[in-house]
Image: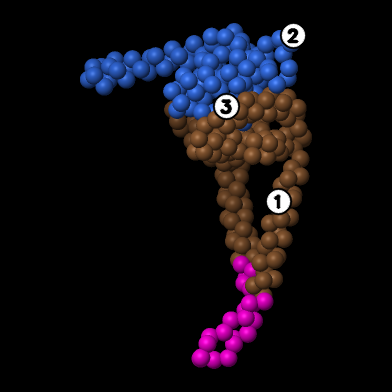
């Protein structure tokens, strides 16, 4: 089911994202990447805390493809083993929505733990 | 060692549905090979962690793909109540019982049968007290009967629960609760 309905309510059905999915999307936010590059970037972004297996990575990529959050990059000389992926417009919008949600939570957490009312 | 584990990983990919393998199999083996080459230079612990992670990831991923409901990404697990509340358990048409599983089951069955045969041959005796007590009869028949009985009881309990829920739904009691909330 692709996210043709881009209302916040529709997006919220898929949130919060799991940490691996969030990191995969962040990895693709900057540039298109191949599977191996995504794995290494996720590991680097999380300081080695999140180390995805190949099965987990491709399970997540398959779901993100189905939901139209990412797409394959057509490369002339790419073999099937070196397929690159990038964010779609809807994937980028959903990622920004999730980041906004997390910012709001972080701000609230900062205020509450400091003893102030938000 | 490297060739052996790579072949093992390729066999693990056989657990995935055929359409998934066609789409991602080549990429997954290429990525696995890259990761494996990188891990080869690391210590035994890191290598072991890598192989365990990859094996577990492949098995869980394969299960996930077999029981995936298209359009319901949150419902891939077997047990969440939401899964049963929203729709019936649907199985992909391309689902096939993996050949490797059939072989594994045959090996396990052969092992169990061999163990039973070995058990039948054991003759116990208590030294200096009495004559040998004779052949010990394996309890597998009792155990099997118990397991079947237990399964039947669970099935009956589930059936009774379902009948009660079905009767309540037919009676419209759930609508009363909804209208009560709306007030």
Apparent side of residue B91 relative to residue B38 in the rendered image (left or right): right
Judged by depth in the image, the label closer to the viewer, 1 or 2, is: 2
Q: CA distance from mark 1 to mark 2?
A: 43 Å
Label 3 sits on residue: B38
For label 2, the residue is A76
Closer to the eye: label 3 or 2:
3
Query: Gap between marks 3 and 1, in whole Å?
Result: 32 Å
Q: Are marks 3 and 1 in contact (CB under 8 Å)?
A: no
Numbered disc in front, either 3 or 1: 3
Residue in the picture at 75% in, 27% down? B22
**Pointer 2: residues within 10 angstroms few (<14), some, or many (20+)?**
few
Which residue is located at x 48 percent, y 27 percent? Answer: A50
In the rendered image of this protein, which colour is used for chain B?
brown
Residue B161 in percent (x, y) is at 57, 50
Q: Which residues are magenta?
A: B121-143
| Residue at the front extreme, as displayed | B41
Rendered position, A84 above or below B38: above
**Residue A56 visible here:** no
The tag earlier along the polypeptide, 3 or 1, is 3
Q: Which chain is blue?
A: A
Along the viewing direction, whichever of B180 and B76 lies nearer the viewer: B76
Which label sits on residue B104?
1
Residue at 67% of width from left, 63% of height from top?
Answer: B112
> Same chain, marks 3 and 2?
no
Query: Residue most toward the left?
Result: A115
Q: How dense is the environment of label 1, judged by Cα within 10 Å: few (below 14), some, or many (20 and up)?
A: few
């Amino acid at each position: 089911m692709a996210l043709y309905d881009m209302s916040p309510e529709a997006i919220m059905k898929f949130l919060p994202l799991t940490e691996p999915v969030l990191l995969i999307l962040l990895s693709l936010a900057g540039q298109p990447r191949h599977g191996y590059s995504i794995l290494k970037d996720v590991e680097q972004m999380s300081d080695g805390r999140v180390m995805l297996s190949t099965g987990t990575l491709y399970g997540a990529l398959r779901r993100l493809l189905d939901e139209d959050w990412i797409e394959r990059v057509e490369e002339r000389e790419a073999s099937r083993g070196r397929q690159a992926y990038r964010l779609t417009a809807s994937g980028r919008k959903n990622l920004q929505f999730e980041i906004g949600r997390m910012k709001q939570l972080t701000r609230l957490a900062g205020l509450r733990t400091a003893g102030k009312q938000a | 060692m490297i060739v052996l584990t790579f072949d093992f990983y390729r066999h693990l990919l056989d657990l995935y549905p055929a359409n998934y393998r066609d789409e991602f199999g080549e990429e997954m083996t290429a990525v696995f090979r890259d990761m494996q080459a990188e891990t080869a230079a690391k210590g035994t612990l890191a290598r072991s962690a890598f192989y365990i992670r990859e094996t577990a990831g492949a098995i869980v991923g394969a299960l996930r793909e077999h029981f995936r409901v298209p359009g319901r990404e949150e419902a891939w697990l077997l047990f969440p109540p939401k899964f049963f509340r929203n729709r019936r358990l649907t199985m992909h048409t391309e689902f096939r019982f993996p050949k490797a599983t059939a072989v594994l089951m045959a090996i396990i069955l052969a092992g169990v049968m061999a163990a039973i045969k070995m058990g039948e041959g054991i003759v116990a005796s208590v030294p200096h007290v009495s004559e040998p007590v004779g052949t010990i009869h394996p309890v597998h028949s009792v155990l099997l009967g118990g397991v079947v009985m237990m399964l039947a009881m669970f099935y009956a309990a589930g059936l009774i629960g379902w009948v009660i829920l079905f009767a309540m739904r037919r009676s419209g009691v759930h609508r009363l609760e909804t209208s009560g909330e709306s007030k």
